[in-house]
Image (cartoon, rainbow, N blue to C red):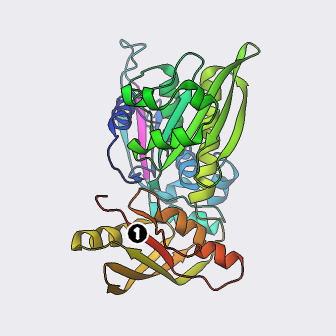
Amino acid sequence: MKSPSSLALIFAAAYLLIGPAHAVVMSDLYEARVPVTDQSSPQRNSALQQAFDAVLVRVTGDRAAGGALAASLGNPSQYMQQYRYEQAPVDPANPTAAPGLMLWVRFDAGVVDKGLRAAHAPVWGKERPRTLVWLALPDHILSATESSPLMQALFVAAEQRGIVLVFPAMDATDKAAVSAADITGFNAARLTQASSRYHADEVLVGAVAPAEGQFAARWQWLLPDQPVNWQTPAGDQSVVSVDGLEVAADKFAARYAVAPDATDQDGVALQVDGIDSLDAYAKVLAYLGTLTPVRAVHVQRVAGGSVYYSVDVHGSLQNLESALTLGGLLSNAETAAPSAATQAAAGAIPAPLHYSYKQGS
């Protein structure tokens, strides 16, 4: 659980990031903080299990991962890398209260991932999509400048799932581009155009409306090929908003996480165009090496501004293709053949994956 001061930093970063950006690398994905009453062994063991449960939820993308899965993995101490006690931040609602105590724990990423694969669980790596949220409430559109219990609830839920949120500034540019009716009506064309200035990896659209004394919400994950829609059950405004974000995190995990019992594929051919400088060459090579499905990258040849790679993959080609465009460094080449995943599904020999480097990324 993040401290209020840490959440404030997350708010500030999410509010201000409008320029070009890449998928966020979650450096603290395998860390957690849990409140304790003292430094005794029973308290530490209990808190260690809670911290491990929280990490498993983020790393697998499964919000139920802290139950049976945690039990099958065994004692969390065997995955622990480091721990320390910290003073809890002052509670703004009760500033005169004595400060509490927190146990901070870091687990070994490699050991955890190995244990998850042995337990036939998915693994969602450290690179996570920056998600732009257009959320229409009954009386206004939630903006980046807003500080409210609802906003804090959304950021807490996002941190627990390993999602980075960005909200629109709702400045003159946004107000001219998007209205509440565009959001409630899921006007994909206008929302897609308005979202381009934020350079987000994913766009989540939500519409909260009164319903029989409570609130209900409709949601859309704005994918370019086929938007995904769902509804959340009636409840108070914060509950239906957080529920929508939780479902979105489930869907993101289904797309980006490497599935249980995934097989290895060696020598997947990848062509990247537009690499006309040493800086671009280094950026793309380093980026490929960070992606969760990628086990190894081998440069085969360089010709005419294009680099040809052989990529060893853990997981499906869909995992690789989803990861390649995460963060905006690469885009599907306009002249590319049908995707390798599509051709493989049709029984054809996969053509090389064909992407372009985005200049200025």
For the C terminus, give its image quadrant.
bottom left
Circle 1 Cα neighbour tier, 10 Å, few/some/many (<14 / 14–19 / ≥20):
many
Q: Position of residue 116 (x, y in %)?
A: 59, 63
Which residue matches tag 1? 356
Q: Main secondary structure of the magenta part?
A: strand
Nearest the viewer among 18 and 214 is 18
Q: Position of residue 206 (x, y in %)?
A: 60, 33
Q: How many marks?
A: 1
Q: Is residue 102 magenta?
A: yes
- Image point 42% across, 56% down: which residue? 327
The residue segment tinted magenta is 100-106
- Image point 51% across, 48% down: which residue? 202
Vertical placement of residue 43 versus 252, above or below: above
Vertical placement of residue 20 versus 360, above or below: above
Nearest the viewer among 164 and 188 is 188
- Quadrant hosting residue 7: top left
Q: Position of residue 221 (x, y in %)?
A: 60, 44
Side (left or right) of 32 relative to 351: left
Q: Is residue 337 magenta?
A: no
In the rendered image, is residue 108 in sight? yes
Vertical placement of residue 1 versus 359, above or below: above
Nearest the viewer among 269 and 105 is 269
Q: Residue furthest left?
A: 278
- Image point 51% across, 74% down: which residue? 336
